[in-house]
Image: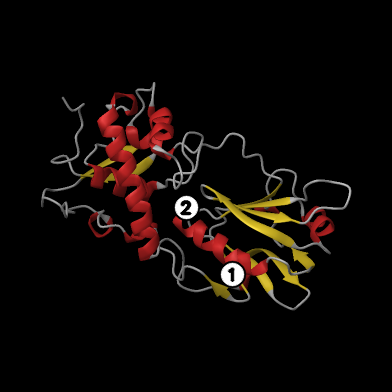
Amino acid sequence: MIEVESYRILAEQTLGRMIESVASPDDWFLKGAASGPLLEGILVGRQFVAARRIGKLLLLDADADADVATGPVIGVRFGMTGTLLVDGDDAIGQLLYAPTRRQQIWERWAVTFADGGRMVIHDPRRLGGVSLDPDVSGMGPDASSVGAAGLAAALAGTSAPLKARLLDQSRLSGVGNLIADEVLWRAGLSPLRPAGSLTSVEVRRLHRTLVRTLVDLTARGGSHMGDLMEERHVGGICPKDGCPLTKSTVGGRTSWWCPAHQESRQER
């Protein structure tokens, strides 16, 4: 989410520039009904007029024809190794799980503008994808703007583990594995705790921590810049109280947490 927000800001540099050609060298990277010829036919001669983000999804709005209200929308997901480049520049630099080098073969989708510049999606592991007019109706509220009441609604009525609920993009958009571990560690809540068991006080504490953590990690430059990050390994020690960290699998993802200060039961 933090990385995608950086890509959204970078993508604003493409707004108002005429699209001259679209390259889709990897058909597998195109999702849903999107195809190389379809995207080229739709986009050439248009301009992107807005760059938006919902959770981990970047949305690029193209201008509309005179007889319709809205134009086509390109949705981009980056996965763990995808990068956006505009005119050769990126917004992040080295990603945690990506190779340190770039190769042309890893360019999955590209737009060339009439002024000679390019926007490129570079993804070594092909974990992302490009779609046309993506359906966002099933996505939860964005984690960067959700209120305490919205967070409470996302967590309510389930015995699913707290971390699994935070990672459920249909409930809350944008929280990834590293952010979830960092937020729960800072909030003092176990990732295994049933999400529906949180008290109103705990939900408010979790919400405050979520907001502060997103601001903090955005300023630092990425989801991988948390205080817990360097200790997420076998033998890792909690930076807060010096206790050995526990490794668990929650929601199908590897989780690191401190059993000493992260409450696993409802506070009384």
- Label 1 SS: strand
Horizontally, residue 83 falls left or right of residue 152, namely right
Q: Kindly indicate the quadrant of the structure image that contains residue 22.
A: bottom right
Q: Residue at x 58, y 34 (%)?
A: 138
Horizontally, residue 42 falls left or right of residue 244, namely right
Horizontally, residue 251 falls left or right of residue 79, namely left
Q: Kindly indicate the quadrant of the structure image that contains residue 193.
A: top left
- Disc sitting over residue 85 in the figure: 1
Residues packed near mark 1 inside 10 Å, few (<14), some (14 to 19) or many (20 plus): some
Res 193 visible: no
Is disc 1 in contact with disc 2, using a CB cutoff of under 8 Å?
no
Q: Residue at x 59, y 69 (%)?
A: 85
**Disc 1 residue type?**
Leu
Q: Residue at x 21, y 31 (%)?
A: 264
Which mark is first along the chain, 2 or 1?
A: 2
- How far from the left and from the top, in percent, is residue 201? 25, 31
Q: Front-most of 51 and 179? A: 51
- How far from the left and from the top, in percent, is residue 97? 42, 60
Residues packed near mark 2 inside 10 Å, few (<14), some (14 to 19) or many (20 plus): many
- Label 2 SS: loop
**Disc 2 residue type?**
Met
Res 132 visible: yes
Instruction: State which quarter of the image contains the C terminus.
Output: top left
Q: Residue at x 33, y 33 (%)?
A: 162
- How far from the left and from the top, in percent, is residue 206? 30, 39
Residue behind mark 2: 1
- How far from the left and from the top, in percent, is residue 17? 74, 69
